[in-house]
C-alpha cells in the first residue's frame, strides 16, 4: 500500500531540512557587502601593481639594461609589487563568503519551487519578494523556531503556500500544526500573500465573489456559498476580512471560513472598516440620520455590543450639522479607502466638484486632502499601501495617478495606458458599442482589468491582452475591493 500524500510531503521536507543543515551559516547583508568591497579592493590593487611594474620596465629599458638582466629585474619587481599576502588572504575569504551567499540564493529558489509543488492541486500563489518578512521570520522568538534550523526551513516553505494548502498541512503532524498556528508564522504568511482584486459573478443560481491572481492567470473562489442570502455585496475589505451586506451585515474571513453578523449596522449608513493599531481592535465607522436636522456618528468595535458615539471634528473644531449631514449623505454611497491607518472618501458633489475626506482613526477627527484635477470617470483605490486614482478619460485610454507624498498631497500620473480594444473586439460576444465595457487599473505596474460582456480581460500597461476569463450567466463586475489572505483567528468570531 502506497504512502499518503501527507507522508510523502513530510518526507520531502525532512530531506530539504537535512540538506539545509549541511550548509554553513548564511552571511549577513553587511558581510556580503564587505566581501564584495574586499574583492574590488584586491582587483584595484592588482591593477595598480601591474601599472607600477610596467613603469619600472620602461625605465629600465630606457637606461640601456641588457635583455637578460632586464628579465631578472622584471621577475624580481613582479614579486615585490604584487598584492600583499594579507590582501590575497582577505580576497580568498571574501570569495568564500560570496560563494556561500550564492548557494543560499540557489537554495531560496529551490524553496520557492518546493512550496509550489507542496501546494499542487490548490490555487497557486507565486511567492512575492518579501525580504523584510523573511528577516522577521528568522528573528522570531525561540518559542516559534525552537532554535532549530529544520523548523526555519519548514517555515520558509509553508509561509509561501496559499491559505488552503496551509490548512491541509496542519493535518500532517502535531509539529506542523503548532508551527502553522503560531502568531509569528500567521503574520509572516499574511504578508507573503498577494493582494488580489475581487470581482462579482453568479454561478449555479448563487452570488459569488472571486479573486483574480494576475501572476498565475487564475480565478480563485473567495465567497461561493449560498449563505448569506442572495444579493450581497462587498462593502469593505481589510487585512483579509470582508464586510458583506445583504440587508443584514456580516464580517467574514474567507481563508478560515469564519462568519459573524453585525446587527448594529442594520438601518445605519456604513462608512468604513479599519484596524485600530493602538488597541489591536477592528472597528466600524457608521452614521445615522435623526430626523431632518441632525446626524450622529458611531464607532463599533467588532465583538462588542455597544457602539460609541463620536462628534465630527476637524482638528479641534466641531463640525456644524449642515456639513456633517452633507458628508454623510455623500459618503454613505461611496467606498472608503484605507491607507496609512486612515479612511479616505472621494466625494462627488452635485455641482460637479470633488473632494477627498480623511478620517484619522487614531485621533478620530476628519480633514480634507487635496487631489489633482483629473478628467474622466475616476475611482479612488489603494495599491501597495498608497492612494491611487484610476481614471478612464476616453474610450481607449485609462490613467493611473499615484500619491507620491502623503503629507503634502503630491500626485503624479504614473501610467497612461492605451486599451487593446481591437484585440477585445476579436471575441464574438464582445460588441463594445452595444454591450459597453468598464476598465480598472489594478496594480501600480499598470495591470488593467477590462470587463466586456461575459468576459474579463487582463491587460498590461503596454496594451497587450495577457489573459481572458469567461463567465456563464450574469455578467461579471469589478468589485473595487481587494483581498490578501489572512489565517489569523479573531476573537470576535468566537463570541
Image: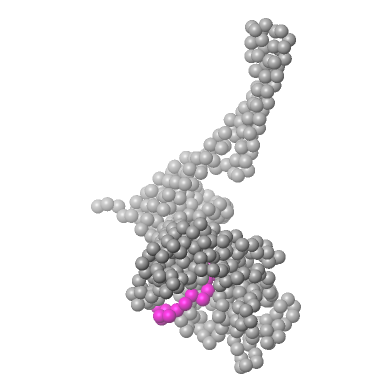
User: Residue 73, located in which quarter of the rendered image?
Assistant: top right
Does any portion of residue 254 appear in the rendered image? no
Q: Residue extending furthest right? A: 316
Measuring from the top left, give residue 6's x and y in whole percent.
Answer: 35, 55
User: Residue 201, located in which quarter of the rendered image?
Assistant: bottom left
Between 8 and 342, the one lying in front of the other is 342
- The answer to whether residue 231 is magenta is yes
Q: Would you say 16 lies left or right of 356 here?
A: left
- The answer to whether residue 65 is magenta is no
Between 415 and 333, the one lying in front of the other is 415
Between 429 and 457, the one lying in front of the other is 429
Indicate whether 320 appears above or below 251.
Answer: below
Q: Which stretch did the figure color magenta? A: 227-239
State how the image is colored: one colour
Measuring from the top left, give residue 144's x and y in whole percent.
Answer: 52, 56
Measuring from the top left, give residue 350's x and y in whole percent.
Answer: 61, 82
Q: Would you say 387 lies left or right of 428 here?
A: right
Indicate whether 159 appears above or below 56.
Answer: below
At horizontal 43% and vertical 43% (from top left) the residue drawn is 18
At horizontal 47% and vertical 68% (from top left) the residue drawn is 198
At horizontal 48% and vertical 79% (from top left) the residue drawn is 245
Amino acid at each position: 500500500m502506497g504512502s499518503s500524500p501527507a507522508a510523502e510531503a513530510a518526507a520531502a521536507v525532512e530531506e530539504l531540512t537535512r540538506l539545509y543543515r549541511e550548509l554553513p551559516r548564511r552571511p549577513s547583508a553587511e558581510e556580503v557587502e564587505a566581501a564584495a568591497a574586499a574583492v574590488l579592493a584586491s582587483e584595484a590593487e592588482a591593477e595598480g601593481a601591474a601599472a607600477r611594474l610596467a613603469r619600472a620596465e620602461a625605465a629600465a629599458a630606457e637606461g640601456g639594461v641588457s635583455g637578460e638582466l632586464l628579465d631578472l629585474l622584471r621577475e624580481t619587481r613582479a614579486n615585490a609589487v604584487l598584492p600583499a599576502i594579507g590582501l590575497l588572504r582577505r580576497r580568498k575569504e571574501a570569495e568564500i563568503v560570496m560563494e556561500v551567499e550564492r548557494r543560499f540564493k540557489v537554495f531560496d529558489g529551490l524553496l520557492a519551487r518546493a512550496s509550489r509543488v507542496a501546494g499542487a492541486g490548490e490555487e497557486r500563489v507565486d511567492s512575492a519578494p518579501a525580504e523584510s518578512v523573511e528577516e522577521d521570520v528568522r528573528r522570531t522568538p525561540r518559542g516559534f523556531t525552537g532554535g532549530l534550523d529544520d523548523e526555519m526551513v519548514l517555515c520558509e516553505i509553508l509561509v509561501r503556500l496559499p491559505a488552503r494548502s496551509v490548512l491541509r498541512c496542519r493535518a500532517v503532524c502535531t509539529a506542523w500544526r503548532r508551527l502553522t498556528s503560531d502568531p509569528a508564522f500567521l503574520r509572516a504568511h499574511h504578508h507573503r500573500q498577494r493582494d488580489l482584486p475581487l470581482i462579482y459573478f453568479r454561478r449555479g443560481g448563487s452570488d459569488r465573489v472571486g479573486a483574480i491572481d494576475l501572476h498565475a492567470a487564475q480565478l480563485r473562489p473567495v465567497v461561493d456559498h449560498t449563505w448569506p442570502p442572495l444579493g450581497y455585496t462587498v462593502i469593505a475589505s481589510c487585512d483579509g476580512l470582508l464586510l458583506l451586506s445583504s440587508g443584514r451585515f456580516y464580517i467574514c474571513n474567507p481563508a478560515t471560513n469564519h462568519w459573524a453578523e453585525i446587527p448594529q449596522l442594520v438601518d445605519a449608513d456604513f462608512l468604513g472598516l479599519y484596524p485600530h493599531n493602538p488597541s489591536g481592535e477592528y472597528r466600524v465607522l457608521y452614521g445615522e440620520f435623526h430626523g431632518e436636522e441632525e446626524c450622529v456618528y458611531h464607532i463599533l468595535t467588532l465583538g462588542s455590543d455597544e457602539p460609541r458615539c463620536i462628534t465630527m471634528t476637524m482638528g479641534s473644531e466641531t463640525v456644524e450639522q449642515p456639513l456633517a449631514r452633507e458628508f454623510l449623505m455623500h459618503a454613505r454611497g461611496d467606498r472608503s479607502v484605507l491607507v496609512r491607518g486612515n479612511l479616505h472618501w472621494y466625494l462627488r458633489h452635485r455641482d460637479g466638484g470633488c473632494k477627498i475626506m480623511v478620517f484619522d482613526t487614531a485621533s478620530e477627527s476628519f480633514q480634507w486632502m487635496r487631489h489633482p484635477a483629473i478628467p474622466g470617470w475616476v475611482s479612488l483605490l489603494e495599491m501597495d499601501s498608497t492612494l491611487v486614482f484610476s481614471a478612464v478619460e476616453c474610450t481607449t485610454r485609462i490613467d493611473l495617478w499615484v500619491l507620491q507624498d502623503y503629507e503634502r498631497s503630491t500626485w503624479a500620473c504614473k501610467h497612461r495606458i492605451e486599451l487593446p480594444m481591437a484585440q477585445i473586439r476579436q471575441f464574438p460576444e464582445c460588441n463594445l458599442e452595444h454591450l459597453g465595457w468598464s476598465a480598472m487599473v489594478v496594480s501600480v505596474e499598470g495591470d488593467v482589468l477590462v470587463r466586456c460582456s461575459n468576459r474579463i480581460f487582463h491587460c498590461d500597461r503596454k496594451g497587450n491582452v495577457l489573459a481572458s476569463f469567461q463567465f456563464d450567466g450574469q455578467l461579471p463586475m469589478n468589485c473595487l475591493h481587494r483581498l490578501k489572505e489572512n489565517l489569523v483567528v479573531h476573537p470576535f468570531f468566537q463570541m
